Amino acid sequence: MAKKKTDKKKWAQDLPEAVKDLETKLTLSRKKKLSPPQERSWAEPYKIKMVEILRMTTSKEREKYIVEAGYNTFLLRARDVYIDLLTDSGTSAMSDRQWAGIMQGDEAYAGSENFYHMEAAVQKYYGYKYVVPTHQGRGAEHILSQLTIKKGDIVPGNMYFTTTKLHQELAGGKFADIIVDEAHDANSTHPFKGNVDLNKLQKIINEEGPEKIPYISLEGCVNMAGGQPFSLHNLKALRKLCSRHKIRIMLDATRIAENAFMIKKREKKYANHEISDILREICSLTDGATMSAKKDCLVNIGGFLALNDQELYKKACNMVVIYEGLHTYGGMAGRDMEALGIGIGESVNENHLRSRIGQTQYLGQKLLDYGVPIVVPVGGHAIYLNAKEILSHIPQDQFPAQTLTAELYVDSGIRAMERGIVSAGRNPETGDHNYPRLELVRLTIPRRVYTQAHMDVVAESVAVVFAKKDKIRGLKMTYEPKKLRFFQARFSKLRDG
Ligand code: F0G
């Protein structure tokens, strides 16, 4: 034994520097103390069966690609992206059970068995009575908006979402922001920045009258605020106020399981509740929901409108045939509905949510350690870089967040999304840009797709770009589509002087 030890030491002397470094690190890490039980590491509650090989590019190639894409990451080809954090929408990895479900697709035009499986899952986990399938979330938003909003109506909501607000406007309504002020402050550490400010809502009710409010649009883990949850305490108070004035609450349930997990972690009363119980309680306080199943529900396509009101359901069934497909498929294939039914069950599993949100928090902590300004507290599905603070020398109408997405792509091939002035669009009355207080870059984490090592690479890239921030120049918009401009707008780089 003793002889072996001396041999190793001698052998170590001849190692290249880099390897010696590694040896020291390894030795040091052995001395680490054991973590207390509450700080023990999480790990993915699954193992990997198949991998997708990624293409690596050089920064020179990426400089060319981003110019060709008009500095808009939506216009890049996916094959030119290394780590794709554009969105968590439709980008999840499905489980072996979901893939097995795909093989059981019943592709009948009417009355597919898979529809009934999906309907039963929605009824079981969310508790709504009626389910209208749609091809994705905006299909459900379209039907709900057209059926309930009249010209001149006001739709109060806890911050806007792009497609949701547009459908409300196309139906003749006007969105009114009733989220708590803290949500607009990237640095506020309020644990429930998705909460509704009941005073703001009361003011609208007083001024406009409840009959002008078709419903409250309530989103879980508010996307545009940084993935911030609302509390059950707040929702109960909202329900009381709305019931008094006979106003419906329609939930945007897109990331509601993640919201339920945050409630368990942050709202003391619910610390020992099952996620599925919290989820059902949330839904029971609302009158229906639109769902983009491409997020929480772990599928690549799909959505639905869930309702308790039979009359509204009948109207929705009539409308879904015009725009999506028959009311037993709504634009989805039978196999998609099967995978969705199974995905709903998996989405409320606490181990899944712990690792899902744990991964987001891991990346957030790394960025905070590098001193990068991000939205806090870290939300459920993404890290939001505070572009307003990082590129404080670039005025908002030179698109700091859009600029930062392009810089990150060129640095390392990671793809992020602008969530600032470009996403906010123009004011339909004045024609001027909307100037949101939050000018953010979203690093959105697909579910069950990337590893912690990928997160390390992302954090390092953001830190490198952050270190050279003062040299970065803004952009000029060269093409602007009329609606949802962020998807297809094009830009060019502003030069010196
Ligand atoms: N509601 C929320 C909160 C969303 O985040 C989305 C989509 C939708 C509705 C619309 O659903 O895409 O299925 O039609 N969000 C994606 C994103 C696009 O990247 O955040 P959809």
Image (cartoon, rainbow, N blue to C red):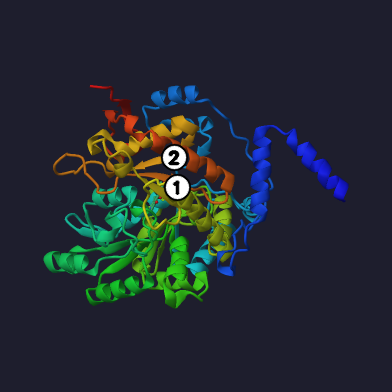
- Nearer the observer, 81 or 128: 81
Q: Is residue 349 visible?
A: no
Residue pictured at 30% horizontal, 75% vertical: 237
Label 2: few (<14), some (14–19) or many (≥20) C-alpha neighbours in 10 Å: many
Per the rendering, the mark at residue 367 is 1
Q: Amino acid at mark 1?
A: Leu
Which x, y percent locates residue 430? 13, 42
Q: Which element carries disc 1, helix, strand or loop?
A: helix
Q: Earlier in the sequence, mark 1 or mark 2?
A: 1
Q: Which residue is mark 2?
A: 462
Residue pictured at 75% horizontal, 33% vertical: 14
- Establish whether ligand 1 lies closer than 8 Å to the Cβ of label 1: no
Query: Vertically, is 418 above or below 497?
Result: below
Residue pictured at 61% horizontal, 57% vertical: 43
Which residue sits furthest left? 207
Which x, y percent locates residue 304? 44, 57
Q: Which element carries disc 2, helix, strand or loop?
A: helix
